[in-house]
Image (spheres, rainbow, N blue to C red):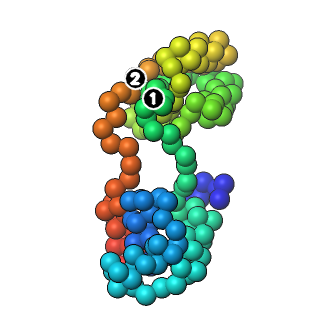
């Protein structure tokens, strides 16, 4: 699903449990999930039904799948961009697309407050990170009012806890 619209999905308890189990172990097969639903939650469902549910949620955009390498393989950084209002009208889109389309961008978003554009970036080394910043300024320097670069190190947590997903079914009821 390429749309930015919120998914239209009515969560069954089974769907939330499947998402919770997949967040514990993304490699579980639909057969494994059907077995876990039966053994752990007393829900008797076929692996075909589980597979169809996962496919439906995936197609509707209920969850996104991304391959995120172990943090030991890359240097992660948080970039915060503030744009110069004087050049914003003519320069915001190319700058935004440059960041969004960079293979180094893992996660890109806007935040409120001081209207900051932020990106979680990943680089093979600090030299390539510095080179990326240099190229960005070279191409889009007039639009940039401020670029803050925070190195992310000692990553202590890098996953979704299954418990947070329980609220998906609770909000439906």
Measured Cα–Cα span from mark 2 to mark 1: 6 Å
Front position in the image: 154 or 84? 154
Front position in the image: 93 or 90? 93
Front position in the image: 94 or 63? 63
Quarter of the image with the C terminus is bottom left
x, y percent for residue 28: 48, 65
For label 1, the residue is 76
Q: Secondary structure at mark 2?
A: strand
x, y percent for residue 65: 55, 54
Quarter of the image with the N terminus is bottom right
Q: How many marks?
A: 2
Q: Residue 137: tell me if it is visible.
A: no
Residues at marks 2 and 1 touching, judged by CB atoms closer than 8 Å: yes
- Upstream in sequence: badge 2 or badge 1: 1
Q: Secondary structure at mark 1?
A: strand
Front position in the image: 96 or 150? 150
Residue at 34% over, 34% down: 155
Q: Is residue 92 above or below residue 50?
A: above
Q: Is residue 132 above or below residue 45?
A: above
For label 2, the residue is 151
Residue at 52% over, 72% down: 30
x, y percent for residue 49: 55, 81
Residue at 45% over, 29% down: 76
Q: Is residue 22 above or below residue 141?
A: below
Q: Residue 128: tell me if it is visible.
A: yes
Residue at 38% over, 49% down: 159
For label 2, count other residues whose C-alpha is less than 10 Å away and answer few (under 14), some (14-19) or many (20+).
some
């Amino acid at each position: 699903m390429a749309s930015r619209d919120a998914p239209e999905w009515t969560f069954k308890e089974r769907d939330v449990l499947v998402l919770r189990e997949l967040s514990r172990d993304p490699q579980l097969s639909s057969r494994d999930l059907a077995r876990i639903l039966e053994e752990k939650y007393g829900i008797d469902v076929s692996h075909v039904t589980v597979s169809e549910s996962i496919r439906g949620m995936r197609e509707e955009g209920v969850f996104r799948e991304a391959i995120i390498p172990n943090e030991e393989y890359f240097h992660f950084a948080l970039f915060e961009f503030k744009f110069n209002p004087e050049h914003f009208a003519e320069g915001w889109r190319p700058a935004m697309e440059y960041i969004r389309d960079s293979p180094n961008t893992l996660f890109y978003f806007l935040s409120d407050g001081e209207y900051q554009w932020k990106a979680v970036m990943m680089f093979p080394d600090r030299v390539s990170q510095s080179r990326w910043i240099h190229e960005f300024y070279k191409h889009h320097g007039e639009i940039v009012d401020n670029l803050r670069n925070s190195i992310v190190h000692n990553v202590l947590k890098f996953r979704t806890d299954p418990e947070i997903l329980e609220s998906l079914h609770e909000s439906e009821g």
